Amino acid sequence: MMNNYIVRFLIGSLTSIILGLLYMGIGRKFIARIRRCYAGPFYQSFIDVIKLFSKHSISHHWIMDFGIMMGFSGIIATVIFLPIGNFYVFPDMKGNLIIIMYFMTIGYLGMAMGVSASGNPNSPIGIGRALALMIGYEIPFALAVILLIFANGSSLLYNIIQTQQGSIYNWNLLKYPFAFIGTIIALQGMLGEQPFDAMIAPAEIASGPMVELSGKFLGFGFLQHASQIFLETGIITAMFLGGGTIIGFFTKQLFLYLLTLSIASVFPRFRFEDGVKFFWTIPTSFVLFQLILFLIKR
Amino acid sequence: MIIGLLFYGIILSFLALFVRKKYNFLRWIIFSFYIFLTLFLTITIGKDSTYFETFNLISILNFDLSLNFRITPLGWLFTLFTTLLLFLTSIFSIVKNKNEDAERLINFFWFILIISNTGLFLADDLFTLFIFWELIGISSYFVISPGWVSSFRAVNYYFIFSIICSFFMFSGIMILYEGTGTFSIQKNVLYFISLFENSPLNAIFVAISLIIGFFVKSALFPFHIWPAQAHAKAPDDFSSVLSGIIIKYGLYRTILFFIPLFLFIKEYPVNHIMVNNIPLFSHILAWSGAITSIIATFLAIESNDMKKLAAYSTVANMGYITTALFSLSSFGIAGAIFHTINHAIFKTAIFLSIAAVKYRTHETQMHKLGGMAYKMPVTFLTFLLAIISAAGIPPLNGYVSKWMIYQGLLSSKFPFLTLAIFLSSTGAFMYLFRALHSIFLGQLPEKFDNVKEVPFLMQIPMYILMFLMVSIGIFPQFVINLINSVLTSYNISNINIKNSMIFSPLSGIDSVKVFLAFTGSFILAFILYLIGKPRKHVQPLDTYTAGQDPADFNLTRELYHFAYKFYGPFEHMFDSFRTDTKEFYDSIERKINEIGGYFRDFQSGSIRGTIYTFMLSFVLIIIYWWLL
Amino acid sequence: MNYNTTVLLIIIPILSSFLVYMPVGLIKKSFKIIFLATILFNLLFSLKIFSVVLKYGNLITIIGNYHPPFGINLVSSFFSILFLIALYIVFLISAIIFIFKNDTKNNQQKISSVLLLYLASFSEIILTGDLFNLFVFFEIFSISNIIIISLKNEKFSLKGSIKYLLISSIGSALLLFAIGYIYAILGTLNLAEIALNFEKISFFSKCFIIFFLMGSILSELEVFPFNLWISDSYAGAKNFVNILLSGISCVVSLYIFIRMFFTIFNYPSISLYSYNFPLDIKLLLLTFFSLSIIVNQLVALTSKNIKRILAFSSAATISTILFALTSGTKSGFSSAILLIISTIISKPLLFLSSHQITKGKMEKNLDSFKNGINRKRYFSILFIVSAIFFTGFPLTPAFFGKLMLFYTYASKLNYYTYFIIVIIFSITVEFFYYFRMIHKLFIKDETERENKNIKNNLSISYFVSGLTMISILIIFFIFPNIYEKVITKMSEEIFNQKEYIQTILKLGEK
């Protein structure tokens, strides 16, 4: 029983890391294609991570080490609750949406704690921006979640996926198109891609949170970002694109990620308070419109 | 037994008054001992007992004024956790108050307060309830401001609101008494329900006067500003009591009065306006909670004083609790009660760690602090766990109750209330992280280089609180079973819980597994950490100046601490929406003073004016009579 | 029952008010003995009368064998005699303070004479059975008030006493008008007979009488806007005068109000109805007293001078008592009596202790309270306890008074109920400024150190009188049943106008 869980846990977590890194590599190539320049091979991210873990690193305090590890483990723990295709780590909690939304924050918290323990003022600036953006994109996303929970009478991603099976017309993408648009924009913010990359902003605050990370800490940052890509695209896939089998699930995730990147590569950066304002107006009103339509119809 | 407990408490409080200043720790040990005694008795009585006690105080002018006490599941639960937290705080206070100014006074009135605390929760009639309510209001006045000029203004906000609330409530009670002829809570609640059927207009008058009482005490909109004043200026260890416990009294009475009423209306909705299957009145109250939570969240994001921040966070939490409570689903009510308990625990932890920081640094402005974690690791860990819990992040206790609140709201289909709570919950994460960063992380200013961890006696409550937060997060069933017995006593369907697995209409969670998932991930992370090449420890400033001595560049660590106006641009977004409620109350105060000053000058006017006024007003009265 | 010795309560003080001038030369100091002996006699004799009243019911004193409704007569009922006893106790305390004070040595003899007149006049006012005597002694009462207010020889006290003089003389004029009018219509001045026939007179006459009688006592009752004298009088008067003013003067006028409204006008069932002028006297009085409560509390809130705060707080309480009486129900009446009890005891104590706390300070304002708990511990505790009693802490008489007040107005849900908000406002403000004063006591004063050499001797007279009053308070706190029976009996008496008329007039028929 326990071994069973451990194996499932390892499968879930490693899949997320590996596929996340893979998506990152493919994404780099994709952006290079858009910009008509060259990129490394699709396995470049793996090489980067291995390289980083084998280099020397500096740390200022044990809290920094602890925070970075906590950040990584928070995202991994969230992935555990994500349905990967039809694979579940815990069969009695098949993708509890509220838990996922709240578990994600521990990743942010850990990362934020680690980098602000590093003492570099650029990192708290970045974190402050990230958190302010978070309050922005949580609103349309939360509205979409509420909508789907109402529609399905359950807050399990499993049930949401089940109702979308059968045909492409059952996908929530087609049932609730406006909600999907809003959520996609929110996803842009969640992943921290342009136009919502004020928190990283290499030119202004020297990559913000990551400024003081080196060696394996940067490696953790990489891994965390990879899992985060996997996680967040996974949630949207399950919510709107009908989940699907393992391969279908991964394809949809990749599609979503590439969509995000293609938006990102043509936009400049929002100031973060403008970003928040944007999130609270355009995507929110899309989702709100959908929600009101739903409530009226019911 | 309860009477005896209260009586001996009063005797002990006077005894403690005569302890000499030199041995003042004895005073606080007596205090802790008494709370421990209360705790012990509460546990031995047990929640299931049908213990009843009455003490004939007097019967005067046909009023039968006796003190009645009864153990109800709700009262017992509240007594248990408040006493436990008071006990932890009192251990903290033993050392903290050693050199405190006016600690004798603080001790005496705090003693009265804890006696009243027990009396309030176990009271069986409205009169007993009112007496203890009044005692709490008056005694906390002197605990917050024992002759301190600095906290005088703050305490007045608290006190005036407190008095207004108690006397509005008193008028409501007297109207109910007029109908029933008894102060018994059960009978009055029944009468209140029937009043809603028979003469709704009068019932609404009663309801509003009661609601004003509860809302003021629980700091709900539009009375949400007093905690930021009073909690911030109170003695540091007392702030935790104010924020963790005293603010819950209004809530307790809300549960006592309004939940039976609204549940009854929900069951028999004849002649009542219903919205979403709950009464309109209840819906309005739920919205008032949601508005409170949003406003308080933004105010907390803006505040730079750490105690103020924590106080606004309390107000926001009271908002969630109220919203959940008035959603009237069994998950909502259970979640509200559970969150009340959790909030008391983590807010006590937050305030105690703030008090520990202030004990060593004497500083409350967050941007002047920083890097305390490197010097006070236990305090830091307490604060960290407390904010994780407060933000509702698994696997600590806050998330179970927040999850239950969401289940309650979502299963009874309140989209916008849920959204409001989502918003304020994310905002909570913002301000809590800001506090964590500004106080404990970042750069340690040079002047705090010699700061040490607090004495061991002050650490004990922190350890216990950490243990509580973690263990309730993993095994919520112990608390939920207690809450289930409360729900049973109100005829609400119980929470379905099997071991650590909670089943809601929408989903289910197993908190042990949630905890294991997190632990597993952390082990994985730790293995990866060990795999990577070992790290090197470097002083923070060393990396900035490319190996040169930072002192050459006049660089101090304080310069590198980014904490002031942490969310500056974000705050600017709301510049055009900002309405200052405090300014509103202040303007009322100014107006009253202006009018009063006018009359005062008028009173001490000239002699001739006196005569004219006399004659004129006599004539005016006669004219008034003609017009009437 | 016929009991003519009651008249001694008035005769003896008047007599000794002249006797105090007799001792001259070496035995000059013995006037103190006469003074105190008179007060003690009055107190003890009133207790004796009280025991007789308990045994036989109302006592009628007939002077010159003119039976009522003719001639002068005194009525000592349960209500009046108890009032008298309470007032005598307050008077005794203030007299002790006055006698043992050092700064009034030069003219103590003269003042004691005035005080004895004061004693005689309020005894007569309370005991009298006819309006004319009431008028005469009301005049004496006012005059002695004026004299004792102006004792301090300061700007404030002179201004205050002149204001009082003018206002009270207008009041007396109004009273005289009313009395003349009554005599013209009914041909009698006996209270019982007026009460018997009051129902029969015309609507206009009723209104005329009510307004003029009320107008005469409003200034004494400290009701805004007729209370413009208190601001200066209280602030400028000596401490024992403050005790007299707050503990006796206003209570005496409250007594007159109760007698007039309940005994003469038969207030709750008074029919003031004419086909075109329906006078809702209840609403009139309620608005009027509400306004007075609010204004007085506001002035108390914004004042800085301690005596002024206490004075206006006392004025607001009197208005609250009137507010309670206006309801015209038994519970309202009980509420009023409870509040009167609370005022009679705690208010003098507040004045006494605050005077001692601020002693030695240049200005008697709020800041002079600073660090009181360390300077004057005993009096600070007295102040705190009496303030708590006065504001209505649970289980104190004032609390029960407020409880009854809320109950009175809650018992019939109509638009009068909303006047409760005035009371809530008043209680809030009152709590605020009393607690502000208590809070000041605990503030540590930095400038204090320099003046450490001030002698901190405890005046024994203040100590004893404070102790007496505080023990009365505590006895009332522990055994509330003492006043419960009293109140029941009082309300029975007051709401039974018929019996009052019968006992007096039957005696006259013999």
Image (spheres, rainbow, N blue to C red):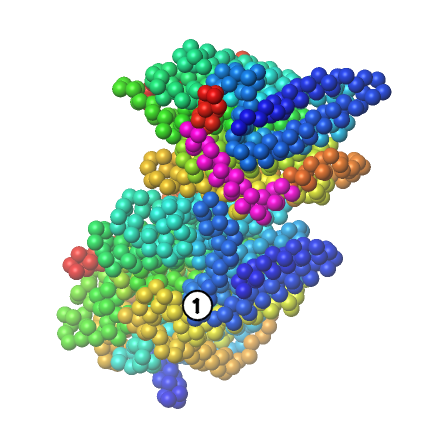
- On screen, residue C385 versus residue B20, left or right, reads left
Q: Nearer the viewer, residue B236 or B546?
A: B236
- Residue C342 in sight in this render: yes
Secondary structure of the residue carrying tag 1 is loop
The residue under the point 28% across, 50% down is B196
Q: Left or right: C61 with respect to C465?
A: left
The front one of A231 and A199 is A231
The residue located at (37%, 41%) in the rendering is: C411
Question: Which residue is situated farthest in the right direction here?
Answer: C26
Chain letter of disc 1 in the image: B
Instruction: Tell me: B608 left or right of B202.
Output: right
Q: Which residues are magenta?
A: C471-499
Q: Which residue is drawn at the image coordinates 59% and 40% (left, top)?
A: C387
Residue B357 pos. (x, y %) = 60, 60
Residue named by callout 1 = B50
Q: Position of residue B318 (x, y in %)?
A: 42, 56
What residue lies at 42% left-to-right and 10% top-to-bottom?
A: C184
Task: Name the kind of residue labelled 1 in the image.
Answer: Thr
